């Protein structure tokens, strides 16, 4: 049984997608704890209702990144996880923290990296005029929103889109690619080769959104 710890900051819909897929598909894995840096994170309710331990490490109680990350690390390490899943976890982590979990920490970012790191990615995509946007699951490295890419999901940018409409379309593919990527890790099928992540046996590490019914 592999052990997974998930970190969230808010709604937690990606966490929910991973939890549901783990149960539905019978992964040889256990979600040990959902940790939030915000006490009011809505995702904590889903976790508790599903019998998963929850923990809050409130970043406002700490005087800096180092002390917050040290407290977070203590909570994570109680479970000796094989994998740490960042699911809408909105904190910049220290290099030491990231290096400690190198090769066993995944993140989902709502853009086709390396385009549009940082915040407000959907508005960035609209402003840049790209016609294809999406989401990326990647191993976490000390550079923000950067690291070997495990899977990407692409969606079209449709005339008339605003950031909210685009975000909703991207979120659907997030909920598809993140559970897949986590399962591949759990199954021991991923290997990092430089900037590239190999999947064995091979299957598509990309997904194109099914937009039937969206009137395009
Ligand atoms: C997602 O779009 C994720 O890619 C980004 O923040 C959002 C979190 O949503 N990092 P949720 O909390 O998983 O619902």
Image: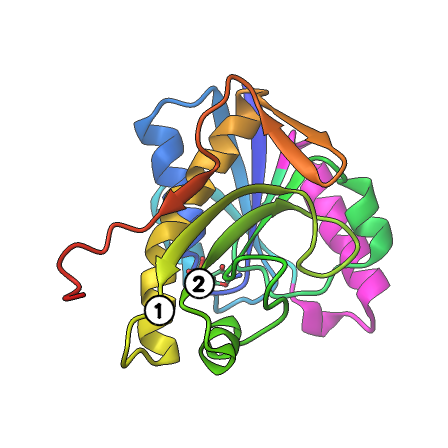
Instruction: Say what secondary structure mark 2 lies in.
Output: strand
Give percent across and percent down for residue 117. Answer: 63, 66
Task: Give whichever of 53, 29 is nearer the camera.
Answer: 29
**128 and 60: which one is in front?**
128
Q: Which mark is residue 109?
A: none
Q: Which residue position holds label 1?
A: 157
In percent of the image, x 32 and y 62: which residue is there? 169
Of 54 and 168, the residue lying toward us: 168
Tell me if label 1 and label 2 are in contact, CB under 8 Å: yes
Which quadrant of the view contains residue 109? bottom right
- The answer to whether residue 143 is left or right of residue 164 is right
Q: Position of residue 150 (x, y in %)?
A: 57, 39
Q: Secondary structure at mark 1?
A: loop
Q: Which residue: 77% across, 62% down?
A: 68
Q: Give the class, few, some or many, for how many residues have Cα within 10 Å of label 2's Cα (few <14, many ≥20).
A: many
Local packing at callout 1 (Cα closer than 10 Å; few below 14, some 14-19, many 20+) is many
111 relative to 23 in the view: left or right: right
Q: Image quadrant for the N terminus?
A: top right
Horizontal arrangement in the rendering, residue 147 relative to residue 52 (left or right): right
Region in magenta: 58-83
On screen, 46 above or below 22? below
Q: Residue at x 23, y 56 (%)?
A: 211
The residue shown at (35%, 69%) is 157
Mark 1 sits near ligand 1, with its Cβ under 8 Å away: no
Residue 175 appears at what percent x and percent y? 37, 48
Q: Is residue 79 magenta?
A: yes
Q: What's the distance in space between the residues labelled 1 and 2, CA to CA? A: 7 Å
Front residue of 102/54: it is 102
Q: Is residue 50 visible?
A: yes
Left or right of residue 11, residue 98 in this image? right
Identify the residue under disc 2. 133
Instruction: Classify 73 as above or below 30.
Output: below
């Amino acid at each position: 049984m592999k052990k997974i710890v998930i970190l969230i900051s808010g709604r937690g819909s990606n966490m929910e997608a991973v939890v549901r897929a783990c149960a539905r598909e019978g992964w040889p894995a256990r979600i040990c704890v959902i940790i939030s840096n915000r006490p009011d994170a809505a995702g904590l309710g889903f976790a508790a209702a599903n019998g998963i331990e929850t923990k809050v490490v409130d970043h406002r109680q700490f005087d800096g990144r180092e002390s917050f990350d040290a407290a977070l690390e203590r909570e994570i390490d109680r479970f000796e996880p094989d994998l740490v899943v960042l699911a809408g976890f909105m904190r910049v982590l220290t290099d030491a923290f990231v290096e400690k979990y190198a090769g066993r920490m995944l993140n989902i970012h709502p853009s086709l990296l390396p385009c549009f790191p940082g915040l407000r990615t959907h508005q960035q995509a609209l402003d840049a005029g790209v016609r294809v946007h999406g989401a990326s699951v990647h191993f976490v490295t000390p550079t923000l929103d950067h690291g070997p890419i495990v899977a990407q999901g692409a969606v079209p940018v449709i005339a008339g889109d605003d950031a909210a409409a685009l975000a909703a379309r991207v979120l659907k593919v997030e909920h598809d690619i993140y559970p897949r990527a986590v399962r591949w890790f759990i199954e021991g099928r991923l290997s990092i080769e430089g900037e590239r992540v190999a999947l064995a046996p091979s299957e598509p590490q990309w997904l194109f959104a099914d937009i039937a019914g969206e009137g395009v």
